[in-house]
Amino acid sequence: MRWEGGRRSGVEDRRGMGGPGMIGGGGIVVVLIALAGYYFFGIDPQAVMSGLESVQGGQQQEASVGNPQDEAGAFVDVIHTSANDTWAEMFQAQGKRYEPSKVVLYDNATGTGCGTGQAAMGPFYCPADNRVYLDLNFWSTLDQQLGAKGDYARAYVIAHEVGHHVQNQLGISDYVEQQSRQVSKSAANALSVKLELQADCYAGVWANRSNTKMNWLEAGDIEEAIGAASAVGDDTLQQASQGRVVPDSFTHGSSADRIKWFRTGFARGNPQDCDTFGV
Ligand SMILES: [Zn+2]
């Protein structure tokens, strides 16, 4: 991917600032232990958030927004900015207002509007503060443990998280959360899968539209994104962590479904084709 030179809008860089324990106050309760068993990207951000929102005392670390000088930070800045620019254009074309997401780089742990963000959770989006949280050590997990290599595998992950922000802006996440409260656990999981697959499809829409504008895709890039979508499928993650697949507890979708929806978004470049709920 030829991403250098892409527009940058800045990231909130908390790297090297230490975890939330260092800022005192003790208002943060960590309830993530209950979620052990899901690793990395396999944690459903919505579920985490709804569980955490009530326990967090609003304590957040702040860092100024700037343009990181290092390559890894610059990459996140360019991709995140491109994703927001792409969605802003689509919203505008429909006469809708789009509030861009923000992105936070951190290491180990950090305070968020949704509770303490832990690196072990993998990248996630917090709807309460409209931020995407990334610990860049996840990139080596993605590459070495999950076997998804390349810069476009990373770009897909960022675009997927911005996809959750778009769902938040459109009220889709709220709708799903409401519905989920009224149904059985397995039905709620099914809804969560649809939300995740839609975020994959949205990542594909971004891949299509940003390339039309920037012409930055290189041979093998789309395969890298597909490799990442496959690597973070629940069946693959479950098999790696438990040695078996338990479809009822899927919250992100199988590898095949994730690939299918990313491809659909990429082929058509139209979010109308991302109705994972209707099909
Ligand atoms: Zn997700």
Image: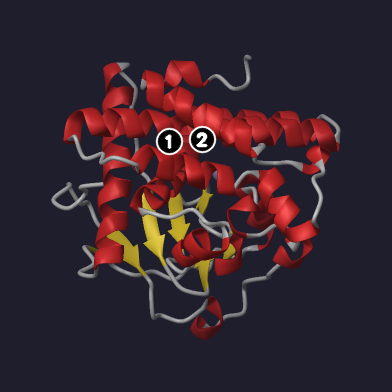
Residue 231 placement (x, y as % from top left): 57, 48
Residues under numbered marks 2 and 1 in contact, where contact means CB atoms less than 8 Å apart: yes
Asked if 278 appears above or below 186 in the picture, the reply is above
The quadrant of the image that shows the C terminus is: top right
User: Does residue 212 lie above or below 82 as drawn?
Assistant: above
Where does residue 260 sit, x and y in percent of width and height?
A: 54, 27
Cα gap from disc 2 to disc 1, whole angstroms? 6 Å
Q: Which of 187 and 220 is in front in this view?
A: 220
Which residue sits at x=60%, y=61%?
121
Q: Note whether ligand 1 is within 8 Å of mark 2.
A: yes
Residue 224 percent location from the top left of the image: 42, 45
Amino acid residing under circle 1: Ala
Q: Residues within 10 Å of mark 2 (few under 14, many from 20)?
A: many
Question: Which label is found at residue 203?
Answer: 1
Residue at 52%, 56% (x, y): give it: 147
**Farthest left residue?**
5
Q: Can residue 73 be seen in this view?
A: yes
Q: In this view, does 13 lie to the left or right of 195?
A: left
Amino acid residing under circle 2: Ala
Q: In which quarter of the image is ligand 1?
A: top right
**Residue lying at the far front of the rendered structure:** 219
Give SS at disc 1.
helix
Which residue corresponds to the image point at 35% horizontal and 33% vertical from the top-left?
206
What SS does tag 2 mark?
helix
What residue does disc 2 label? 199
